[in-house]
Image (cartoon, rainbow, N blue to C red):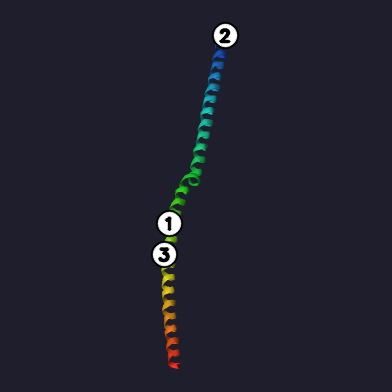
């Protein structure tokens, strides 16, 4: 009877050890899978600004820069026209003064 009891306890011990081994293997696999997936998510989140957000920001920045350059171009054209008109007006005055001086000397 003690031998049967010993055999049963040994069998129960083996069964318990196998159960713990399977349980630890499943828990270890689950934790490993979870951490791998977590690392992938973290990597994707850190890559988001480089791949997605900044491209749109660059498009917005590009539009702002193009608009600003267009405004600067218009201002330069306006200034150039003003300067040309002012130059022509002054040259006309100088020409009139010179022609008047020539007429006075003759």
Q: Circles 3 and 1: CB distance less than 8 Å?
A: no
Q: CA distance from mark 2 to mark 3?
A: 106 Å
Please give the count of numbered marks on the rendered protein: 3
Residue 2 image label: 2
* Residue at the spot 52% in from the left edge and 40% down from the top edge: 43
| Dot 2 crowding, Cα within 10 Å, few <14, some 14–19, many 20+ | few
Is residue 61 or residue 70 the one in the foreground?
70
Residue 62's spot in the image, x, y percent? 45, 54
Residue 105 image label: none
Q: Using the image, determine if residue 11 lies above or below residue 58.
A: above
Q: Which element carries disc 3, helix, strand or loop?
A: helix
Task: Name the quadrant containing residue 28.
Answer: top right
Is residue 29 or residue 8 the one in the foreground?
29
* Residue at the spot 50% in from the left edge and 40% down from the top edge: 44
| Figure quadrant of the N terminus | top right
Residue 49's spot in the image, x, y percent? 48, 46
Residue that protrudes farthest toward the front in the picture: 106
Q: Using the image, determine if residue 83 lies above or below residue 4.
A: below
Q: Using the image, determine if residue 59 lies above or below residue 31.
A: below
Is residue 57 or residue 80 the one in the foreground?
80
Q: Is residue 100 left or right of residue 25?
A: left
Q: Disc 1 marks which residue?
A: 64
In the image, which is nearer the foreground, mark 3 or mark 1? Answer: 3
Q: Using the image, determine if residue 93 lies above or below residue 72.
A: below
């Amino acid at each position: 009877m003690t031998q049967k009891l010993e055999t049963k306890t040994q069998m129960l011990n083996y069964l318990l050890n196998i159960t713990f081994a399977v349980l630890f293997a499943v828990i270890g696999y689950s934790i490993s899978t979870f951490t791998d997936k977590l690392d992938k998510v973290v990597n994707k989140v850190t890559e988001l600004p480089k791949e997605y957000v900044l491209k749109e920001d660059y498009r917005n920045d590009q539009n702002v820069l193009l608009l600003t350059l267009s405004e600067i171009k218009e201002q330069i054209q306006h200034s150039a026209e003003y300067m040309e008109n002012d130059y022509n007006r002054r040259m006309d005055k100088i020409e009139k003064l010179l022609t008047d001086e020539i007429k006075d000397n003759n």
